[in-house]
Image: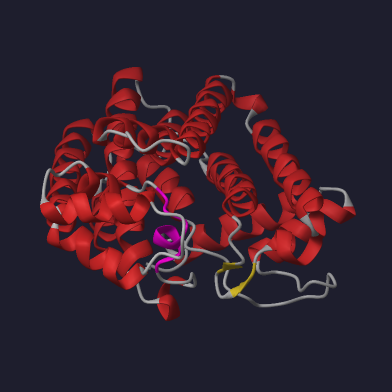
Amino acid sequence: MTAIEAGPATAATVRAALRAAVDTLPAPARTVAGYHRGWLDEHGAPADAPAGKSIRPAFVLAAARATGGRGDPVPAAVAVELVHDFSLLHDDVMDGDRTRRHRPTAWTVFGVGPAVLAGDALLTLALDLLRPHGAAATVLAAAVQELIDGQLTDLAFEERNDVTLDECLAMADGKTAALLGCSTALGAILAGAEPERVRVLMRAGRELGLAFQIVDDLLGIWGDPAVTGKPVGADLARRKKTIPVVAALTSGTPAGAELAARYAGTGELDTRAAAQLVAASGAQAWCHDRIAELRDRAVQRIRAAGSGDPTDLLALARRVTERRS
């Protein structure tokens, strides 16, 4: 999936509005955010680097069309992408990731403090954009709180060896699914949809968000770095409790037990061997089954909730669960 898959005119409108919003930030934060987005180089000069897939804005626009498209969803599309960028800037610092989108991460270029503060500026800007839209701002703020709670839980998992699969899925529901569910809800809200349609599309978005995270975790183990832009096996090297890993650790299989022993060690982890153990435990297959189940449930909700054209939203449901990057 590339860019905002919502028709060229609408995609261009969102990109222009996003750039205009970021340009209102103070210069230091604007430079960090512009670098993270791929618009600027480390000196603040124009650049043309990869800027991400803009999946969440696409869901906003598609949900608005699925519910009749009577309003302007662009402010919400911009706001959810700003929140996503806030989370990525902070994630890279917390995880120590040095590469994103085939470039050095912002904190490695500008320092930890400027990267964190730029993320904070993006979050504030996002909430400010939706302030005139009342209920939409409340929905976004609630999603951010869930995102932060999920991230805190994820960090806490690093200190535990007894994480259950249910706990891991609940963490991902907050850390990732909440914002995607928020995206579909905001599209419906700004399109003037009835509260029940908003709730159904939020649920569908959350299901697709959880499926998206499972796919992301699988790509973190088996993805092609040339495509994903991130080092292969980085999560395994940090002994991170991702969904496939926890599914393996709690599988009750010999492969899961061996992976647990290796995760409990302190030396450098053989990531290739660890990946083989995850697959041998059945966790990889379980993840693919779970992705399909979540997608099918979301598709049923989308078809049931629409009062407009659900074509784009249904296509996005398929693409986020079949992606390779």
- Across and down, in percent, residue 100 comes to 57, 66
Identify whether 107 is placed above or below 69.
below
- Across and down, in percent, residue 231 comes to 47, 71
Q: Which residues are magenta?
A: 233-240
Q: Nearer the viewer, residue 257 or 47?
A: 257
Residue at 58 percent of width and 57 percent of height: 13
Identify whether 276 is placed above or below 69.
below
Judge whether residue 54 is colored magenta.
Answer: no
Q: In the image, is 171 to the left or to the right of 145?
A: left
Quarter holding the N terminus is bottom left
Q: In the image, is 147 to the left or to the right of 273?
A: right
Identify whether 293 is placed above or below 31.
above
Q: In the image, is 257 to the left or to the right of 197?
A: left
Residue at 30 percent of width and 60 percent of height: 218
Q: In the image, is 132 to the left or to the right of 150?
A: right
- Across and down, in percent, residue 270 comes to 36, 69
Residue 312 seen by the camera: no
Q: Nearer the viewer, residue 275 or 57?
A: 275
Q: Number of marks in the image?
A: 0
Q: Nearer the viewer, residue 108 or 261?
A: 261
Quarter holding the C terminus is bottom left
Residue 183 seen by the camera: yes
Q: Nearer the viewer, residue 220 or 312?
A: 220
Residue at 26 percent of width and 55 percent of height: 259
Q: Quadrant of residue 28?
A: bottom right
- Across and down, in percent, residue 302 comes to 22, 38
Residue at 31 percent of width and 42 percent of height: 210
